[in-house]
Amino acid sequence: MDRVKQIFNVLSGRANPEEIAALQRWLNESEANREEYENIKLLWVNTIATNSKKQVNDSGFERLRRRMRAHTVRARRIKVTAVAVFFSISAFFAGYFPGTFQSGRSPRAWQFNQAKLVEVIPRLEKAFNISILVGHESLLECRVTATLVEVKDVREAVSSIARSLNLHCAEKGDGIFELKGNGCVDEHSVL
């Protein structure tokens, strides 16, 4: 049965106990259902008040249904407009303050504190879409303490880390770097 017609039947006293129970279950499902019921009830009461001397029939029910649909459409338009305004304002501020939103960009500052090279390399590779190779596996255990601010040139970032570890950095191709050397300067290299 149509939900509005079911509410109409309950309010008019024509609903059977099963319909009343079904409506009660529907009302308990969500706040939106209770709000819709209250709106229909308000319209019902107003219709009864204006037609107190007339008997409410199906044409009154149809007017009630049209009013409810118009109310629902207006409410939906208001919500859509509010969401559109929110996203428009967000897009404006994202463009106006580009440094604030870092989505899809490398971080403005990198800080490594006693981080093993094996932990540093994947972060740089992912952020800058590069590959970093090491000449010897033991180099991966070298520890780096470094702060790289406003990294604009990935070559400079990789070279800085290599220098702090007394390693040589060679660019092997487009976005491919290789770190070579005898090992760390000491157990805890600082940049």
Image: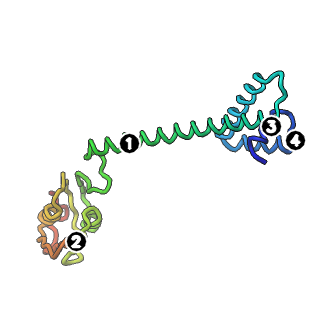
Q: Could you give the CA–CA distance between mark 1 and mark 4, rounded to whole angstroms?
A: 50 Å
Q: To which quarter of the image does residue 31 belong? A: top right
Report the residue at 24% width, 57% height from top.
112
What residue do we see at 18% from left, 62% from top?
Answer: 154
What is the three-letter code of the residue carrying label 3? Asp
Give the residue type at disc 2: Ile
Determine contact: label 1, label 2, CB under 8 Å: no
Task: Tell me if mark 2 has few (under 14), some (14-19) or many (20+) residues whose alpha carbon lies within 10 angstroms of its own.
Answer: some
State the SS at label 1: helix
Q: Secondary structure at mark 2?
A: strand
Q: Amino acid at mark 4?
A: Pro
In the image, residue 167 sits, relative to residue 8, either above or below, namely below
State the residue at coordinates (28%, 45%).
95
Q: Which residue is mark 2?
A: 132
Q: CA distance from mark 3 to mark 1?
A: 45 Å
- Mark yes or no: residue 185 visible: no
Instruction: Give the residue number, with chain letter if any, for mark 4.
Output: 17
Q: Which mark is residue 58?
A: 3
